Image (spheres, helix red, strand yellow):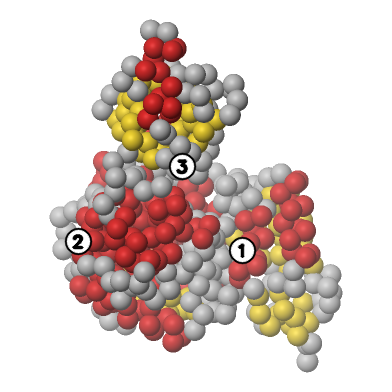
Amino acid sequence: MDREHMDHAANLMRARRVGVDTYQEPVVYMRQDCAVCRSEGFAAQARLQLTVGDRIVVATLNIVHGDWLARGEAGLSESAWAALRPAEGATLTVSHALLLDSLSHVRAKVYGHRLDAAAFAAVITDVAAGRYSDLHLAAFITACAGDRLDLEETVALTRAMVAAGERLDWGRATVVDKHCVGGLPGNRTTLLVVPIVAACGLTMPKTSSRAVTSPAGTADTMEVLAPVNLDIATMRRAVERTGACIVWGGSVRLSPADDILIRVARPLDLDSEGQLVASVLSKKVAAGSTHVLIDLPVGQTAKVRSVEAADQLGRRLQDVGRAIGLQVALRITDGQQPVGRGIGPALEARDVLAVLRRQADAPDDLRQRALRLAADILEMGGAARAGEGLRLAGEVLADGRAWATFRAICEAQGGLREVPIAAHRQAVVAGRAGRVASIDNRVLARAAKLAGAPQSPAAGIDVHARVGDLVQRGQPLFTLHAQAPGELDYALQYVSSRPPIFDLTEAP
């Protein structure tokens, strides 16, 4: 069949991989003079259904002006190609995507109306199926932002997100988990809590996220040490062998709509208590958890700014937890400054290993925070009596059982890896002597991201001073780590253009 006839035959086109990363949004490229475009009236930003065999994806159309794409070819972005998995030049069918009735619910929410359970179910089903464009997703996220979801709506959204994906059942009465609300650089307690808790006999299948707005998520840091892109079968084998795992939640389709919403919410940088609660708890229920501890760091530059805000968010988490059959406990912690020394996947992994290996120079704040959280989970899960959890957690860490369990978890997930080291480093020093009064967590995290974290795992920041420390003029406050000199320069320029990240007061 020649090119001209292929254009006309039942909207058949040849698939071509164009190598464009569209940030997980499936995109299809077609020429302006393509016969299929003309006959179907396709216009830029149209939503098209692409079919190859039994695989279907809905993609956003971009119109090409130029000759780099041949007539009769449909160029596929990387995410569209991954979803369809065609051979180069394979035939695909192109058609209009079905109209989405659920968009009427999104419009209703935009205008301030409440949505019931059926409306949220319709929206989330279409989101999880990939039927929403990024524009549609942004509209839904914005409509739900702020305080626009009440308790009943939050419960309905949470249930809809659970129903749209896989749900694990471990066949055990007690399955524990934890989550940190975030905004605190270096707070990588999960990689310590999980092996401590598992060594005490509790089941803790931890599904974690990658970084959303931070220089590293739990999954990013764990991936430095072991594979995290596990399927459900491999995840189950790891838990059967060790009692625990630490994997990326996106690889096992637990609450997949949440992963899609997070991808679009990240650049919008909008806060929504209802969406946060639904995001956290839907993944816990989907992962088969029965008991969950929520860590709420409080600080002026953390995600939660005050104890009052933490109390409000905590009540919402517990109320929604009760409604969906999940026992939720809370721990409000200090969020005034980074935890540990490292910020970024490899540097945080280094700190975790130092604590597990009981090294003399291991960051004590990370150790003590992890022990406190592990103690809460041990008591909540029935592995320790009330008031005895901290002693048990300390013993398990001190005698090496936690380290042995962590090594076993890594081996079950594919093997323990060496921690990479960045090629380029530059210290940022104090401009004058003084005592550290405060540290801007958000600006420090931003600098670590500009240095390349988490995309470059070895990139990030080493923190050398803490709140209350007395520093001298010229003393290093932190060191930037980068894989490329350009990224190091970019981060240094950002730091030098801002007010000091470390606020120094006159020493007495």
The amino acid type, in three-letter code, at marker 1 is: Ala
Characterize the local packing of mark 2: few (<14), some (14-19) or many (20 or more) Cα atoms within 10 angstroms: few
* Alpha carbons under labels 1 and 2: distance apart: 40 Å
Of the numbered discs 1 and 2, the one sitting upstream in the chain is 2
What secondary structure is marked by label 2? helix
| Type of the residue with mark 3 | Gln
Q: Are marks 1 and 3 in contact (CB under 8 Å)?
A: no
Q: Residues within 10 Å of mark 1 (few under 14, many from 20)?
A: many
Mark 1: secondary structure: helix
Q: Residue 428: give x, y in percent of width and height.
A: 77, 64
Residue 99 seen from this side: yes
Instruction: Give the distance between the C-alpha atoms of the residues marked 1 and 3, in whole angstroms.
Output: 35 Å
Residue 445 - label: 1
> Where does label 2 land, which residue?
118
Closer mark to the observer between disc 1 and disc 2 = 2
Residue found 46% across the figure and 42% down from its top: 45
Relative to 176, 294 lies left or right? right
Q: Amino acid at mark 2?
A: Ala
| Location of residue 443 (image quadrant) | bottom right
